[in-house]
Image: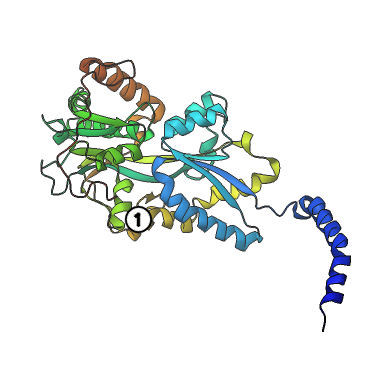
Amino acid sequence: MSGRPLARRVASLAPLLVLASLLLYAVWPWLTRGRVPPTIVFYGFSILGEVMQEGVLPAFQDDWKQRTGEQVEFIGSFGGSGTVTNQIIMGVPAELALLSLELDAMKLAKAGVVPAASWRELPHAGLVNRTPFIILVRPGNPLGIRSFEDLTKPGVRVVHPDPLTSGGANWAILAEYGAGARAHPDDPDAGYRMLLGIWRNVVAQASSARGARTQFDSGFGDALITYEQEALVDLARGKLHADVVYPDRTILSEHQLVIVDRNVAAADAPRVRAFADFLWTERAQKVFVEYGFRSMQTALDAGNPRFGRIADAFLVSDFGGWDRAYKEIVVSVWKERVLKDLGTTERGRPRSLRWERAGPDPHLGKR
């Protein structure tokens, strides 16, 4: 059979096909309007990347899909808590932010980004999870480090996040100060001396807790002061090439959620609030525990056998809350006494600070 009749028919239909294509192109935006998945814009402090992207966000997407039939997508960004706070103040469209500490939420309120103390109306006053501050040391713990006090000894090289940009660094300062003060409650200068001894030995700083960890993994220093979670997530994956030291006395950091209502459209508010509420559900809290964060529902912590025991775990509330602790410890002791005694640059780093690598480590670069 000749193919010419068929070819002629196709040729005669070509103008209609072109017209149909043009019409479809013209009306496609209206046909698909409302079908683009809605988004939630979430910002978080540095060590949240894995748990949120691999665990919590997919869990909420699944939960929301089952409840509403709607697929929701996330736009996220993670960095030092101070950096994230400054970005939000400068206008990034974050709808929610999980910050390392309430102090950064206070900065948002002072800048007029959120109403003062609005986060305290959330469950647990907006605190989503916790993690204590611990010490990472080289495999085998060659310097025999067992406590914060051991970090004050001559020759110990400490890696530390930068208090100017890192919420974790401010927690670390409270951990160090508190360890000294609680070990010698009758000595008003015990916390100051602990800070002075440790900061005399700081040889490298980074803008976030994650950045400080990268420095340590790259060979800088003998010890790193960091979140327990930062160590446990790699320990669970067989990627931790360091030993974990649990000081007898250390602080439990508590991480603060804020909702940036000015960035939330009215139509999106129920979805954003549902995600905020989801963070305190048993499902989400179990994910946090799996990834090395301690739960606000303390009974769930039994789900992670890697959590270490701390004899004296204290909270920022033991210092009167962040407003008081920042003024009386971070500013009055660390900034105005310790750094002054060390001799500092304008950015608050010891003039003698040198970035020093540890000896060769066969695991470096494998993380």
Residue 37: percent from the left, percent from the top?
65, 53
Depth check: give the residue in front, 326 or 69.
69
The residue singled out by tag 1 in the image is 301
> Is 340 above or below relative to 56?
above
Q: Nearer the viewer, residue 45 or 316?
A: 45
Q: Nearer the viewer, residue 270 or 159?
A: 159
- Vertical relation: 2 (above or below) 90: below
Q: Position of residue 284 (x, y in %)?
A: 47, 55
Q: Residue furthest bottom?
A: 1
The answer to whether any part of residue 251 appears in the image is no
Residue 326 position by quadrant: top left
Q: Secondary structure at mark 1?
A: helix
Expressed as whole percent of the image width and height from the top left, the position of residue 113 reads 57, 29
How did the renderer colour the structure? rainbow
Q: Quadrant of residue 237?
A: bottom left
Q: Is residue 35 visible?
A: yes
- Indicate left or right for 176 with 152 as reference: right
Number of callouts in the render?
1
Q: Residue at x 47, y 57 (%)?
A: 282
Image position of 156 (left or right of 161)? left
Corner quadrant of residue 227: top left
Q: Residue at x 27, y 47 (%)?
A: 365
Q: Could you classify mark 1 by the number of other residues whose Cα lies within 10 Å: few (under 14), some (14-19), or many (20 or more)?
A: many
Which quadrant does the N terminus fall into?
bottom right
At label 1, the amino acid type is Asp
Image coords of residue 201 (percent x, y): 18, 28
When the figure is inspected, residue 324 is found, relative to residue 21, above or below; the finding is: above
